[in-house]
Image: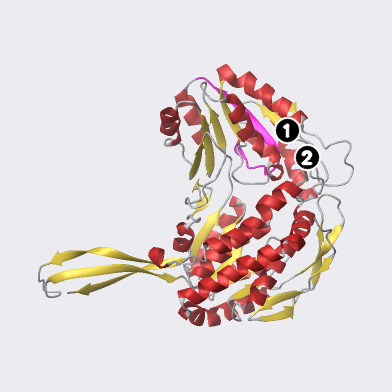
Amino acid sequence: MAEHSTRHETQLLIGGKWVDAADGTYEVVNPATEEVVGHAPAASASDARAAAAAAKEAQPAWAAWSVEDRSALMREAARAIRAKASELLPLVIAETGATATVGSRMQVPVAADRFERYARDPRAVLQTPLLPQSAVATPLAPGGIIGGMINRQPVGVVACITSYNFPMVNMAGKVAPALAAGNTIVVKPAPQDPLAVVELVRILHEVGFPPGVVNLVNGIGPSASAALVDSDDVDCVSFTGSTQVGVTIAERAARTMKRLLLELGGKGACVVLEDADVKAAIGCIGSTWTFHSGQICTAPTRAVVHRSVFEQVRDGLVQMAGFLKVGDPTDTATIIGPVISAAQRGRIEAHVATAEEDGGELIIGGTRPADLPKGFYVAPTLITGTNDMRVAREEIFGPVITMIPFDDEDEAIAIANDSEFGLYDYVFSKDGARAMRVAKQLQAGHVGVNTAQRNHDAPFGGFKMSGLGRDGGDFGLLAYSEPQSIIWTS
């Protein structure tokens, strides 16, 4: 893996031109070393409004491009991302703190895969026939055989605002289907780690997306994002991040009836029934520690475990934690890297501190690793207690697992559903029919049965306070288009 060199990015892409950000630049910090990775452009609200206007102007011409030409450009983007993978990977690791394993498998390649996926012909999704109907004459119109189709039009201009955990992948997951459906976009990455997204936009610019189709704004504060949400030129806001920010976006976007795709917080429950494969369940629950330091909304952070196997699962997790190396993300032996910032580490520590106040027991972790004086590290943490604890109710976004016992299936379902969130749950049982029955009773947009694997063509999104809308696979095309019914007569 190539070494990362410090980057100094000062410009935004607006209407096909790279222009200096109005508010200068700010430092991006490596969460593993606390050293400066580089500088990122700081957009103003005026910059954001200019980007939205450029996208609005470019949208009709982009929508008029042939499917074949748009698809060819998407495939070229995928190829160009893969060609720069060796350059992008060290940059992503440096600014996110992702381990070499997570970065090489999940951060860069998946971004290219998403452009490849949406290079497919979208017309089977965007144009669907309706069964004809026989209609008798009415005062409204003569009778006949009435045909129809659903023609999905691009929603228009999409503001793509993403979180810090998987900057390139999250952005590609919004940008690729939005572009494939004929929309133009304004890219707004998370302020903590925007540099790889800047490079992604540069790639799209260089492969030939027309001026104004892809625009970039970036900033350290909320002003640029707020300007996009408020802009009359933006038709849809696609946001991944916290529920608190998502609620604010929904409130402001309602003033202009913007379409929304909100992928918000999670507090995933992993229900381990008494007949579960305990080893497999431990592997799933432990992914809260091993997968990007728990900085993922789908993490099984609440282990809801039958009392008969509770100690077995707890002891297995304790044993597992002992083998997890915490440290330098560039070391291929490292399993747990840092969290994104000192502020986020402080929030995690504050959450853990409430556990004993709420009657919980800290089994392992809860402290900073003593051998890592630099970097925003949090040791893998395991807490046992009840679902009433704050650590069981609030999204922590770190390597913290809460274990909660139950005595029967109905109680397990009640505990899992007793949350304001409903994004991603899990069920483990050797009885597949039983696991399926439980899964169907969980109030979550996604349920893994005996696995933490994903099917990327499945609709992804949450119930309750975990968001609005779905994307993924064909559902990504639906998210960025409006259904138009076209009716005719024989």
Q: Which mark is residue 378?
A: 2
- Give the quadrant of residue 56: bottom right
Position of the C terminus, as image quadrant, is bottom left
**At label 2, which amino acid type do we have?**
Val
Helix, strand, or loop for circle 2? Answer: loop
Q: Distance between the residues labelled 1 and 2?
A: 8 Å
x and y percentages locating residue 151 in the rendered image: 36, 70
Residue 144 on image: x %, y %: 13, 71
Q: Which colour scheme is used?
A: secondary structure
Q: Can residue 276 be seen in this view?
A: yes
| Of the pair 372 and 350, the residue shown nearer to us | 372
**Which residue is depicted at the point 61% across and 35% down?**
284
Depicted 97 relative to depicted 78: above or below: above
Which range of residues does the magenta coloring cover?
393-407
Q: Does the magenta stretch include residue 476?
A: no
Element assignment for label 1: strand
The kind of residue tagged 1 is Thr
- Kindly tell me whether residue 226 is visible in this rendering: no
Residue shown at the point (63%, 29%) measured from the top left: 282
Give the quadrant of the N terminus. Answer: bottom right
User: Disc 1 marks which residue?
Assistant: 381
Q: Please say whether residue 401 is one of the residues in the magenta stretch.
A: yes
